[in-house]
Amino acid sequence: MTSQQMTHDVIIVGAGPVGGTLACRLAAAGLRVAVTDKAPLPPMEHPDFDGRAYAIAAGSRSLLDAAGLWDALPLPAGPIEQIRVSDGKIGRPPSRLHLHFNANDLNGTGSLPEGASQTSGATASGHHALGWMVEARSLRIALNARLNTAPNLTAIAPADSTASFDPAGATLRLSTGETLRACLIIAAEGRGSALRRQAGLTAQTIPYHQSGIVCAVAHQHPHNRTALEHFLPAGPFAQLPMAPGEAGENLSAIVWTERTADAPRFMAMDNAAFGDQVARRLGPHLGWVKPVGRRWDYPLAAMYVHRFVAPRLAIVGDAAHGIHPIAGQGLNLGLRDAIALADLLIAAHARGEDLGRANLLAAYQRARRVDVIAMLAATDQLDRLFSTNNPAIRLARGLGIAAVDRMPRLKQAFMRQAMGLH
C-alpha cells in the first residue's frame, strides 16, 4: 500500500502536551495526521486554575511556535530570566554559596547563543529568557482548540484503540468503529503506554522513594522573573516565576520533592499550615505566601526504554522516558523527542518517502538516545548528591556550586542545555 492509499500519513495515540503538539506541528507542515485519546477534547475547555504549570525551555518554545500554539495561548506565559541555585536547610536562609544564571549573560553580551532565534529566546520586554512558565490549563485550551480546527488534522476522542502492524503500514481500530491506516503510529500515551508494551519495548524503572508535591502560591513581593532551586535534605525545592494572576497578584509555581513517607502529612494540611511549610523552605525574600489552587502529589521514579522504535512505531515523551524533576526538564525532554521526529518526518514527506521505513526510525533512535541517557543520568546523580544531609557532602557541593558560579563558559554551557539549545 502506498502513502497515497493511506487514510493518514501518521497516527498519534495520545493528545497530551507532547503528542498533541507533535500532531499540530506535523499538520502545519502539510502531513495528514490523526490523533486519538481516551479523554474528550472539548474545543472551549476552560477549567479554573488548578495549580499546575509547565516550564517551557526556549528551544521547546520554537516547537510550540511552529505548531501554531504559542500565539494561541489564552493566558500570558511567565518568563524565567534568572535562576538561583543554592544549598539550604529548612527554616534557615539559603547558603551564601550559590550559583546564579542570568539569561542576559549568555556569551557575555546579552545576546542569545549562536543558532537561537530571537523569537525563541526573547521576552516581550526585549530581555532574554531561559524559559517560560505556562499554566497547564492554558496549553490545554490552545491544544484542544487547535486539534479540533487545524487543517490536515483529525482528532478522535474519547476513543480506545487497538493497533496492528504489517510491512506496508499500520492500522488503528477505534472503539468508535472507525479504522485508520497510516505509514507510522506514534505512541504518546505516557508511562503506561500500551503500544510500547505491545511492541515489546521494555522499560527500566528506578524508584526514588520520593514524592513531587506540585502547587502554586501567591506571595507578597514580586519574584522579578527569577526562579529559585534550594537543595534540601529530603530533595530539591523549586520556586518558578509565573505571570501575574487574574487580580494582578504575584504568583509562583512550587515543585517540592519530599520523602514519600512524609508527603501525605503535608498534603493533608490546611492552607495556612501548608503555606507555612512552603515559606519555611522558600525563605523570606517573597514575603508572605498563600497557596492558590489545588495541590498535586506524584510518586517519583526514573524510567528508560532501551529502544524508542519498532516496525512502523515510534514512541515519544513519557512513553519513552521519565526523569527526576530536579532540573525541570521532563516535559522539555519529550518536546525534544517531538522536534527530532517532526524534522525527520517533514523532510521525508517532502521527498515523497515512506514515513515508517526502518532507516528513518533508526535515525530517530540515534537522534534521541544520547540526549535522553545524558539527562536521565544527570538528574539521577544530582538527586543522589543533593538529597542528603551529610555535612561533608553539603560543604563539598556548596563549594562546587560557588566554583561553577565563577566559570562563565561552564555557566553558559549549563544555560544552553537548560534552554534546549545544545
Image (cartoon, grey):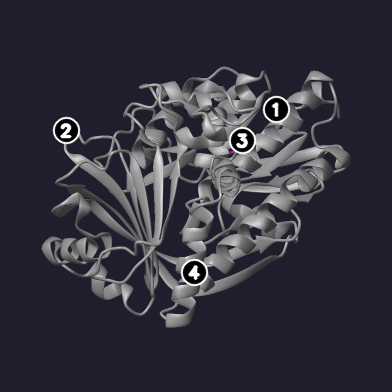
* Comes first in the chain, label 1 or label 2: 1
Q: Are marks 1 and 4 in contact (CB under 8 Å)?
A: no
Residue 309 in the image: x percent, y percent? 76, 49
Q: Is residue 311 left or right of residue 247?
A: right
Circle number at residue 248? 2
* Comes first in the chain, label 4 or label 2: 2
The residue type indicated by label 2 comes to Gly
Circle number at residue 397? 4
Q: Do the residues labelled 4 and 2 touch (CB within 8 Å)?
A: no
Alpha carbons under labels 3 and 1: distance apart: 13 Å
Name the front one of labels 3 and 2.
2
Alpha carbons under labels 3 and 4: distance apart: 57 Å
Q: Which of 151 and 364 is in front in this view?
A: 364
Q: Is residue 279 left or right of residue 20?
A: left
Name the front one of labels 3 and 4.
4
Residue at image location 25% in from the left, 75% down from the top: 265
Name the front one of labels 4 and 2.
4
* Comes first in the chain, label 3 or label 2: 3
Which residue range is magenta in the image? 176-180
Residue bearing mark 1: 8
77 shown above or below 215? above
Residue at image location 16% in from the left, 33% down from the top: 248
Alpha carbons under labels 4 and 2: distance apart: 38 Å
- Look at the numbered disc 3 and give the secondary structure of its residue: loop
Q: Which of 295 and 277 is in front in this view?
A: 277
